[in-house]
Image (cartoon, helix red, strand yellow):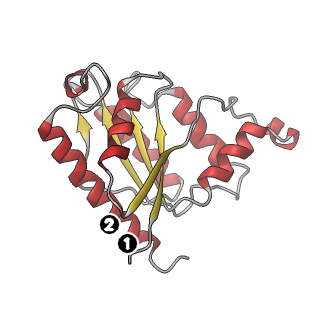
Amino acid sequence: MAELLNIGILVGSLQRDGLSRRLANAVIALGDDRVKMQIVEIGDLPLYNPELEDAGMAAWQRFRSEIAPLDGILFVTPEYNRSVPAPLKNAIDVGSRPYGQSVWAGKPAGILSQSPGALGAFGANHHLRQSLVFLDMPAMQQPEAYLGHSANLFAADGSLVDGSAKDFISSFINAFASWVKRHTAGTA
């Protein structure tokens, strides 16, 4: 029996019923028995300030302790002003500090970006990749995942209704599970 991969999903938008959260939930629903996926919440993280490190910021500690044991990270994000939303960037900063104690180092990553417009959050996807290089997170290159017109993919109840999107997301999850497995082999 193959070892179960634990994947954390960071949702870039804080909207409770936003398109990114709907997409993250669809990813979880489409997952198979090789992966256990869960959303790691970022909405309660105070803005990172190194002067507060010694104050024992409980939300920062909770976040770091949830990320540390994961085998891989999937970022599901919209695009804000051709970049990632501020809460997602803050979560990245919180996890990368204190210096030398990053919970991200070596963790394989994937990016699934979406937008109600045509470009599928291309700018956010590529801007996030710049941070992942610095964080030493090997980011899956193919398949790339930019879901444009994402509002059309969901029913009113939040379920994924677009068949071709389901097929694409399923193949993306399979590729990502293989990517994580390749990069975690022999590290246990």
The residue under label 1 is 182
Is residue 126 shown left or right of residue 169? Answer: right
Q: Which sits in the foreground, 95 or 131?
A: 95
Q: Residues within 10 Å of mark 1 (few under 14, many from 20)?
A: few
Q: How many labels does the image show?
A: 2
Amino acid type indicated by mark 1:
Arg
Residue 64: mark = none
- Find numbered disc 2 in the image and state the secondary structure of the residue it sits on: helix
Q: Are marks 1 and 2 in contact (CB under 8 Å)?
A: yes
- Where residue 61 sits, quadrant-wise, is top right
Residue 76 drawn at (x, y percent): 39, 39
- Where residue 163 sits, quadrant-wise, is top left
C-alpha gap between disc 1 and disc 2: 6 Å
Query: Going 16% across and 33% down the picture, which residue do you hit?
Result: 162
Residue 70 drawn at (x, y percent): 54, 59
Q: In which quarter of the image is the N terminus?
A: bottom left
The reply to whether residue 101 is in sight is yes
- Find numbered disc 1 in the image and state the secondary structure of the residue it sits on: helix
Residue 178: mark = 2
Residue 140 drawn at (x, y percent): 33, 57
Is residue 26 shown left or right of residue 147? Answer: right
Q: Which sits in the foreground, 164 or 82?
A: 164
Query: Going 50% across and 62% down the picture, which residue do you hit?
Result: 71
Residue 33 drawn at (x, y percent): 35, 62
Q: Which sits in the foreground, 79 or 73?
A: 73
Query: Going 52% across and 34% down the picture, which residue do you hit?
Result: 88
Q: Quadrant of the C terminus?
A: bottom right
The reply to whether residue 143 is in sight is no
Is residue 70 shown left or right of residue 182? Answer: right
Amino acid type indicated by mark 2:
Ser
